[in-house]
Image (cartoon, helix red, strand yellow):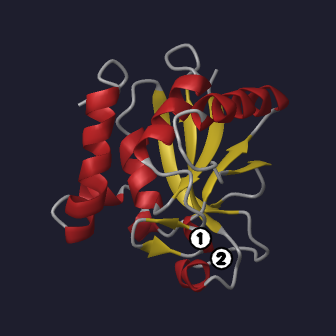
Amino acid sequence: MTQTITLAGGCFWCIEAVYQRIQGVERAVSGYMGGHRAHPSYEQVCTGVSGHAEVVRIDYDPQQISLSELLDVFFTIHDPTTLNRQGNDVGSQYRSGIYWHSPEQEADVRAALARWQAHFARPIVTELLPASTFWPAETGHQDYFNQHPAQPYCVAIIAPKLRKLYEHFPEQARI
């Protein structure tokens, strides 16, 4: 039986591309969460008027990969200590966040954050909340890296995150 966790760590193209390559992840879908507007558009999210974060909803098989392992990848591939930004992507839509789908997940999420804080000199500012309504992103944002691997953003920003995945988690990564 699959479980779901929703993550925000900058541009959703990055998170989606990484989690699509992890054994035990059955599906990674880019979308929006945490705002106050129903059916937000990419333009509304990017301008900050909707209050949503760019997120990826991840369906995974806990018999193949644990939530703890998924969160280890999360804390490795992005900087959870920068508020509302990842690199040159700036704005509340790029915030770091973990949105759990059950009380058991909340306990695992809080334990992972406490464990990972020791790895960072600055405080982790990752938003920790129960999952709210997930709005799938437009079709052009789904599976973005796989469709545009030579696009400059993909080469400069996403490819290094994939290298981190393969370097730090070779057992979990699928090629």
Residue at disc 2, secondary structure:
loop
Q: Residue furthest left?
A: 150
Q: Residue furthest right?
A: 103
Residue found at x 58% / y 33%: 118
- Looking at the image, how many numbered discs can be counted on the residues? 2
Residue kind at label 2, given as amino acid type = Pro
Closer to the eye: label 1 or 2: 1
Within the image, what quadrant is residue 2 found in?
top right
- Where does residue 100 sit, x and y in percent of width and height? 73, 40
The quadrant of the rendering that contains the C terminus is top left
Q: Is residue 41 left or right of residue 147?
A: right
Judge whether residue 66 can be spotted in this image: yes
The residue that label 1 is drawn on is 93
Within the image, what quadrant is residue 39 found in?
bottom right
Q: Is residue 65 left or right of residue 124?
A: left
Q: Residue furthest front?
A: 121
- Where does residue 128 sit, x and y in percent of width and height? 74, 48
The residue that label 2 is drawn on is 40
Q: Earlier in the sequence, mark 1 or mark 2?
A: 2
Q: Nearer the viewer, residue 86 or 152?
A: 86
Residue 94, compared with residue 71, is above or below; it is: below
Residue found at x 55% / y 60%: 82
- Where does residue 123 sit, x and y in percent of width and height? 64, 49
Residue kind at label 1, given as amino acid type = Gln
Q: Is residue 7 left or right of residue 33?
A: left
The quadrant of the rendering that contains the N terminus is top right
Residue found at x 36% / y 48%: 17
Q: Nearer the viewer, residue 80 or 95?
A: 80
Whole-angstrom CA distance, mark 1 to mark 2, is 12 Å
